[in-house]
Image (tube, helix red, strand yellow):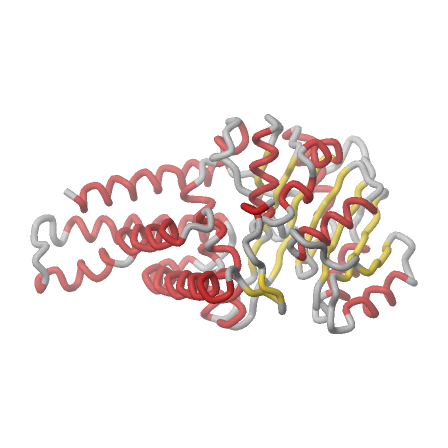
Amino acid sequence: MIWLVALGVLILIACIGVLNTLTFPRLRPARLRGFPSVSILVPARNEAEHIEETLNRLLGLKYPDFEVVVLDDASVDDTFVRAQTIARRDPRLSVVRGQPLPAGWLGKNWACHQLAQRAKGEILIFTDADVRWEPAALDAVLHLLQQTHADLLTVWPTQETVTWSERLVVPMMMFTIINYLPELAVRYMPWPVFAAANGQCMAFRRSAYQRIGGHAAVRANVVEDMGLAWNIKRHRMHLVMAEGNWLIHTRMYRTWTEVRDGFAKNILAGHGNKPFFLILSGIFHWWLFVVPWLWLPLGWLLPWHEGWPWLPLMMVVLGGGVRALSAAVTHQRLQDALLLPLSNILMTVIAGQALVWHYRYGGPRWKGRTLARQAEHL
């Protein structure tokens, strides 16, 4: 019976994935009817490796009315100097040093709050310092914002994956969004449970950002992007998700250590900061995406003879199919779907890292800071 339930869950996941494949908005080059003023806001901490290319790309956007504001968040490299050198050549770019981190705030949230206070535009776009924008990207973002009447448009950048650790782990982020979260429900249903956002690119109408209290309302939230999306829903405003479609893209990490720590930073917060829920999630994903792949070739040695081999075969095909489907939607490699069990094993290692940080330090560690869980104390 338990495996029939698992098969039913996989069928439901497949149905959501197919529906999202048909409905998920994608950025596309477009012509605008009007040109609202835009502030592109870039928090940067130790981003010397990326900042010059990022800013040159942003300043190359084909849009008539925008500013770029970079806030250096206590970098220990020459991020500020490199950004300031570019700013001297282009008045659309301003670079500021961040103020000391106050008690009760997390670093990125404080940086974004300061950026919003300096912004002049009608549209506020928060984007990470390693996210690359193509020349037509801003027009595409604003067109979709206008077309959907979104108060918050969050874009999932196309992820560049090169090494095996990137290929196996990074696409799992969009695997979850495409196969677990009905996009139409995010767009049209008011409940916060149907909400998701990606802090790599978030475009707000200024009035909406101010109404939800901005980053001050999520000051101690490790997954501040999700917190902002939930707040949009709670205020009965309009949230829209979109796929970057190579107009906005990024390479998040390059080594296994970066992949592990980057995902471990958020994974526990994404489960409500409850270790029990994280462990339960791990068991759930092994049940669906690892055990059937072992059961299929080894079933003749195991006591689970009922339904073998057809039941595990169906589960393997469905599991690999939904992984391949999300890969096709998000411009990843279809063949990596065959390594879905390994991806889940690596996600288990990442969850273990998060739990070690949780019990040893009280929160995740990132860029020299311990991101203590303070939200419940505010």
| Quadrant of the image containing the C terminus | top right
The answer to which image quadrant residue 213 occupies is: top right
Q: Quadrant of residue 236?
A: top right
Residue 122 vertical placement versus 199 (above, below): above
- Side (left or right) of 75 relative to 27: right
Residue 372 % position (x, y) = 56, 58
The image quadrant of residue 15 is: top left
> Could you tell me how many numbered marks the image carries?
0
Q: Is residue 378 left or right of residue 214?
A: left
The spot of residue 322 in percent (x, y) is 37, 48
Query: Does 256 appear above or below 268?
Result: below
Between 125 and 119, the one nearer to me in the picture: 119
Residue beneath the point at 51% across and 55% down? 266
Residue 223 pos. (x, y %): 56, 50
Q: In the depicted view, which residue is nearer to us: 30 or 255?
A: 255
Q: Residue at x 58, y 42 (%)?
A: 227
129 lies left or right of 349? right
Residue 234 location, x and y as percent?
A: 57, 30
When the figure is inspected, residue 151 is found, relative to residue 117, above or below; the finding is above
Quarter of the image containing the N terminus? top left
Q: Residue at x 53, y 61 (%)?
A: 364
Horizontal side, residue 72 vs residue 319: left or right = right
Residue for point 60% across, 35% down: 231
